[in-house]
Amino acid sequence: MMSKVFLIDLNKCNGCYNCQIVCKDEHCGTSWLPYTAEQPETGQFWMRLVEKTRGQVPWVRVSYTPTLCAHCAEAACIAAGRGAVYRRDDGLIIIDPETAKGNKALVDSCPLGAIFYNDELDVAQKCTGCAHLLDNGWDVPRCVDACAHDAILYKEEAEFGELLSKAEFLKPVADLGPKTYYLNLPKRFAAGTAVDFAADEVLIGATVALKNADGVVATQITDDLGDFKFDQVASDTYTVVISAEGYIPTKAVADLTERDLSLGDLGLIRA
Amino acid sequence: MRIKDKTVYQNLGSCGFGGASNVGCVDVLDGKVARIRPLHFGDTYTPDELNAWSYEVRGKTFTPGSKTLLPPIALAYKKRAYSPNRVPYPLKRVDWNPKGDRNPQNRGISGYERISWDEATQIIAEELVRIHDTYGNRAILVQGEGHGETKVISGAHGCSTLLLDQIGPETDEYTVQARQPDSWEGWYWGAKHVWGCESHGQQNPQDNVVWDISKNCDALLFWGADPETTPWGWGGLQPSRLCFWFTEIGVKQIHVAPDVNYTNACHADRWIPVLPNTDAALQLAIAYVWITEGLYQKDYVATHVEGFDWFEYYVLGNEDGIPKTPAWAAEKCGVPSYRIKAFARYWGTHLVSIAHCNGGGYIRSCFAHEPARLEAYLLGMQGLGRPGVNQLKFIEWDLQDLYPVPPSTVSPSLYASYHGWKMHAPKYFFPKTMTPKAITNPPVSWYGHVLCSMNRTDQFLGFEYPGDGPRIHMIWSDTPCWETCWNGGNDYQEAVRDESIEFYLVQHPWMENDTLMSDIILPISTIFELKDIASDIYSGQWNMIVYEEQAIEPIGESKGDYAAVGEVAKKLEQFGGIYEGIYEKYTKGRSFEDDLRIAYENSSIPLDEYPYQKFLDQKFLLFPTEENWKDRKVGFQPFFEDPIANPLKTPSGKLEFYSLGLAENFPDDKVRGPVAHWIEEADGHEERISSKRAEKYPHLLVSNHPRWRVHAQHDDIPWTREIATCKVKGPDGYLYEPIWVHPTDAEKYGLKDGDIAELFNERGGVLGGVRVTERIMPTVLYQDHGARTDILKYGRQGLDRGGANNLICPTATSSKNAAGEVTNGFLVGIRKIDIDQIARQYPEAFARDYHPQIGLVASARIIEGE
């Protein structure tokens, strides 16, 4: 059995929504029976770009996560489908648009929220991996074709080689054998600037230590703008300690359990 | 299973003027557009055939890609063709009677009734004859110059001029609202006077600038530039790919702007928030640090710069007693002085270039010529043209010979069959920024032809309207978006409702914006419904010429612009005399097939190498990369190396920190004087947080080029409208244009995410949906420009539900002698709105047909017909 998988690299995603939009271009107003009935014009996101604004002025970043049916090896929807949800030889999971009619439980069966209910047609729907195109000469689904950055790839598992070993899964489906691998999923950041307010100067070359309960996790030297930024650190509560020669070290608490943090301009006073 | 019946190739660019882009495959199934997808030209051409260019820098490789890099607005474009907001058939305003009462005061209020093409063109022909005989054709204002779908033979904007040219007695015997820079005002009115770059005013030449940045730069500054948004309409996603490339090779990307734009959001290494249109203060303080700490290229300045001493004199405070220190600037621009110093020192000791698209906030604000000139000064102080020091333009590549990425061997021009206004210097005109005043309160006077294609010295020519000619009595528009794209739309509404305007004709595909104030509306086809030819030169990959076959049948009774005006020409024949044979003159007796062949054969494509038949058979042809592209000197490198042998197009041939042309022609101008200054208030602008007006309207509004539109285009696509950054769903189910509010300001006003708020000043108000976000700095508000109007109350002090904030932007031009538009960085207040109360106040507007996903629809305005 072939086993193609999606590999999605968030460091290559510019947030253009091409993936979300071409999915609609393919499926809204056009039915591809027997693969799937048409998708409503709006409100369903078989490919959803999840957008999150992180941090605070002036350290702000937006992360974008293309999210689609993970075509899980141990898919909960197949059980919930009572025979109407099946896996193709290439690994794609299809909700049969005829026999699945009326089964609203399919929507809740997906821990990722990737199944939607079409009230008008009385049927649950989701990403088909553009199976109707793959069966008619296409190599990849629309979302992959439309990405200008190769942020979304669809290949044989083996073709990705080492890349998959670094990949992660989205949490809700991590234990279900998902076919959607992710690189560079966002973790947390903390950033700020070291300043000698009395001198009206930033502090370049100060040492900044990021500590958690276990001790120092990382250290940085402030750059030409006096800045430091700890990126892709684990969600945790930290203390940031800034020290510079001739100055009294300063500390700030960085609670990164719930959010990323701009620590702002942190003042150091001469010793 | 059939997944398509046929594929046609079409450009889905939104620039117009024949400048195509975003070529895609349009798959058609059962007579409808089934899908739009990138064109994989790599399946047709090998890299060798394309002489494929690449950068190999710092151990990494960049290649241009083997498929077209379509943006989302192109991929979703079929929704515009099938929009319920299409003009379905010719329409006449119900209470406009050309034989009786014309009710100009009801424009925008009264509805429309269906009429036939025969009736519509008969009325138009009779009105044209009447206007001609009563006033002369100079009483006709042609609005035929804005952006739009990029068509050539089937009709670009301005087909009306091709017909009016045949009425005579000579050509150009009508009045044009001259198409001005509408995104690069400051470069055009300011920077040109420093570095002479023609004609847009950003750095020109651009040769190999991207390669130079890749090889040499430590950092690239994005001073309001948003390559993840602005180039979408005419270039696609190559700029986005380059931003990833710069990250990959370690070129630091620093954003200086009040907002986290879409490039900053995913590419920036550092964001320096600055208050809107205070960049000039920041720039002066950087110059102060460099001068006082010796951090600039003194030898270069001595040999390459004219009038540095004047600038130094001003910066150090000798002229006005105020040294332009970081502390002085911090108070104005909101950047702490310690950060200004650190930034200036970093810049002064590293190789730094600056990136722009066209605008960025300051370039479209009042006095935009000052920060634009100051940017050229700063680049000059760092040795403009030396490796790693240039200004990169991320848009309109190949236009005006700009080649920041390697050029193709052929750049086809289709003007031999271009059916539209060709942007030549008009005989009778006024600046587009002065249209309302020219209609209601002439005379008006200004400097320059103001066309974006004009050279620096044109700005010294004085003009006046109407001179010895008539006032405007008829408007003929295929560009009906003045309200939401130009400076002070509420004034425009007053103007077109003036009784002097006897006839307002619009031809357009959609019932939107100014269309709703016209008297006759002709339905126009979208590009899918027409056949045409396109030359895509903007992609940053390889230039391409495309035979655009017709994808689908026309929607409703629509026709292409060229055909629609042709129908008017046919009707004029009945009047004989000067109108005899006018249709033949209009078309030059050429069929589409004739025009197609003529366009191709006169496009500069070598016909022996690329025969016409090959074009017809293959439908698209790519042209390989120029041989020896690496030999092109980088940007200003020739000037850097030898300023005497390679002078700039300035009077002195040098970088003019003291602009000799301005000094000579405008000796009394204190706002755009010979040396760029910080201007607090002047020439009708009080748009500072320190201004008296700020007591009532305390917030500066950032109004960038829109993320999900190209100016006024694309606002009815349901798949973008459901994206959180595109619209905000109000409690009434209406999709409002987002207003970004920082959490501290939201708290102050009791605003929460999803609330409806009004932005207002003495010019009127516009509504929006609140997004509480960290993407805007405290005290500043943000709302994209160009939203589709949904007017609740017309005219001055009007109110718009659509969020078209150009309605309330300043009406005064950039400054007294610079006729640019000011549409960004102006003062507004904000207040929370109880929408139920507004609904009670404007019951008729709230009762209009509204599609929850698409917004306003044509049926809202058609009160008779089927």
Image: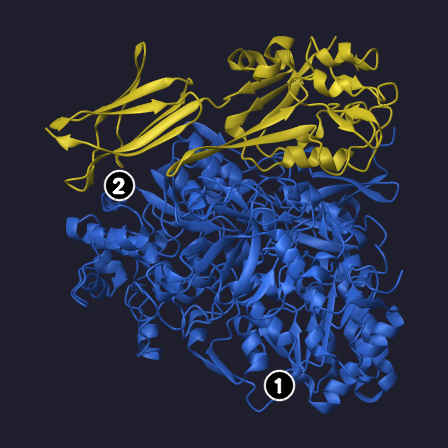
Chain colours: A yellow, B blue
* Position of the N terminus of chain B by quadrant: top right
Q: Residue at x 83, y 15 (%)?
A: A84
The circle drawn on residue B346 is 2
Instruction: Tell which subunit mark 1 falls on.
Output: B
Residue holding disc 1: B471
Amino acid type indicated by mark 2: Tyr
* Residue B474 appears in view: yes
Q: Residues within 10 Å of mark 2 (few under 14, many from 20)?
A: some
Q: Residue at x 53, y 46 (%)?
A: B770
Between the C-alphas of marks 1 and 2, the distance is 56 Å
In the image, taking residue B586 as reference, residue B64 lies left or right, namely: left
Instruction: Tell which subunit mark 2 falls on.
Output: B
Q: Residues within 10 Å of mark 1 (few under 14, many from 20)?
A: many
For label 2, the SS is: helix
* Position of the C terminus of chain B by quadrant: bottom right
* Residue B205 appears in view: no
Q: Residue at x 57, y 61 (%)?
A: B485
Q: Nearer the viewer, residue B403 or B572?
A: B572
Residues marked 1 and 2 touching at CB (< 8 Å): no
